[in-house]
Image (cartoon, rainbow, N blue to C red):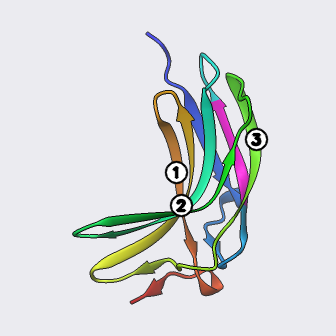
Amino acid sequence: MKAEPTLTLIVDAGRTSFEPGETVKGTVSWAAAEAPSSLEVRLFWFARSKASEHVGVADVMAVRSPQPIGGESFALKSADAPYSFVGELITLTWAVEAVFEPGRHAARIEIVVGPRGRVMEI
């Protein structure tokens, strides 16, 4: 039986709150039996309501020629908007995600992007 790849994501030594337009830094590390065909780190937001889900990507870093075992630093710039918010009908969440192919293995850390690094309540 083949061991599952491992994927580890660390954002700014555990920091989870950022100002709009701020750069989100961190590291991604991985280990697999074979080199991934692709490995990306993405900074994105997603808005969910009972009826739908919307996604927007602020920045992406592709790891070039990843080896079976490795690690990379990343620096992804957040957008000036939208802000993280929580409402009765819809919520908007920001996240940093690393995605490893084949097999669509992923690691995700949710963060806050908003004025003073705070979630807005609407």
Q: Amino acid at mark 2?
A: Ala
Q: Position of residue 42 (x, y in %)?
A: 60, 53
Q: Amino acid at mark 3?
A: Glu
Q: Amino acid at mark 1?
A: Arg
Q: Position of residue 53 (x, y in %)?
A: 33, 64
Q: Is residue 42 above or below residue 72?
A: below
Tell me if label 1 and label 2 are in contact, CB under 8 Å: yes
Q: Quadrant of the N terminus?
A: top left
Whether the magenta-drawn stretch holds residue 61 is answered as no
Residue range in magenta is: 25-30
Main secondary structure found in the magenta portion: strand
Q: How far is disc 2 from disc 3 in space, using C-alphas?
A: 18 Å
Marked residue nearer the N-terminal end (1 or 2) = 2
Name the residue at 70% across, 25% down.
69
Name the residue at 54% across, 26% down.
5
Q: Position of residue 88 (x, y in %)?
A: 28, 83
The residue indicated by pointer 1 is 108
The residue indicated by pointer 3 is 72
The answer to whether 39 appears left or right of 105 in the picture is right
Q: Position of residue 30 (x, y in %)?
A: 64, 32
Q: Find residue 95 and name its label.
A: 2
Q: Residues within 10 Å of mark 1 (few under 14, many from 20)?
A: some
Q: Residues within 10 Å of mark 3 (few under 14, many from 20)?
A: few
Whether the magenta-drawn stretch holds residue 29 is answered as yes
Q: How far is disc 3 from disc 1 in space, using C-alphas?
A: 16 Å
Name the residue at 68% across, 37% down.
29
